[in-house]
Amino acid sequence: MNAERVFIDTNVLTYLFDSAEDEKQERAQQALATETREVFVSTQVLQELYVSLTKGKNPITTSEVAEQAVHEASKYSVVHVDAALVLSAIQIARNHRISFWDALIVGAAARAECETLLSEDLNAGQLIEGVRIENPFAFRQPER
């Protein structure tokens, strides 16, 4: 049986280090803890991870820890952003009316032939370029 190919957006990796968001931190850990998935990221995600962990007056963590986080994330399968992917993302952004940066993530996931993109930045359940969007942080309300 082949492992499901899953692309991880920056926000999922960022929550692994954000102790101020303990419920999201736990869900991010659960999303990455499965052995039945082959995990992909892109060079864009690696760059954004460092920035998201170190930006602002009260960064989530130190630059040293952020560097280590990028090092660990680079052990996943990495999709390299090149000119062809940038041009593809422009078309995806136009066709689906999403931001260029989100389109670049979707394009990388499609290039890697991922079935699923884990992200909180797009509409869960949406299918873009053959990639299903799943929000691992969507909290289900208990049924009454």
Image (tube, rainbow, N blue to C red):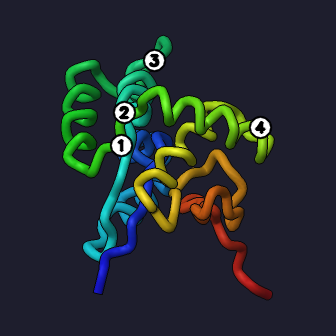
Q: Residue furthest front?
A: 84
Label 1 sits on a secondary structure element that is strand
What is the CA distance from the residue labelled 4 to the residue labelled 3?
A: 29 Å
Determine which of the numbered discs, if any, sits on residue 55 in the image: 3
Q: Are marks 4 and 1 in contact (CB under 8 Å)?
A: no
Task: Point out the image quarter for the N terminus.
Answer: bottom left
Residue 21, given in percent of the width and then of the height, sits at 50, 46
| Figure disc tally | 4
Q: Quadrant of residue 126?
A: bottom right
What is the CA distance from the residue labelled 3 to the residue labelled 1?
A: 24 Å
Badge 3 crowding class, 10 Å Cα cut-off, few under 14, some 14 to 19, many 20 or more, is: few
Chain-order first, disc 1 or disc 2: 2
Q: Are marks 1 and 2 in contact (CB under 8 Å)?
A: yes
Chain-order first, disc 4 or disc 3: 3
* Lateral position of residue 7 relative to residue 2, left or right: right
* Residue occupied by mark 4: 94
Badge 1 crowding class, 10 Å Cα cut-off, few under 14, some 14 to 19, many 20 or more, is: many
Front in this rendered view, residue 137 or 95? 95
Determine which of the numbered discs, if any, sits on residue 43 in the image: 2
Front in this rendered view, residue 31 or 93? 93
The kind of residue tagged 4 is: Arg
Determine which of the numbered discs, if any, sits on residue 79 in the image: 1
Residue 86, given in percent of the width and then of the height, sits at 54, 30
Chain-order first, disc 4 or disc 1: 1
Residue visible at 59% across and 38% down in the picture: 88
Q: Quadrant of residue 63?
A: top left
Front in this rendered view, residue 56 or 51? 51
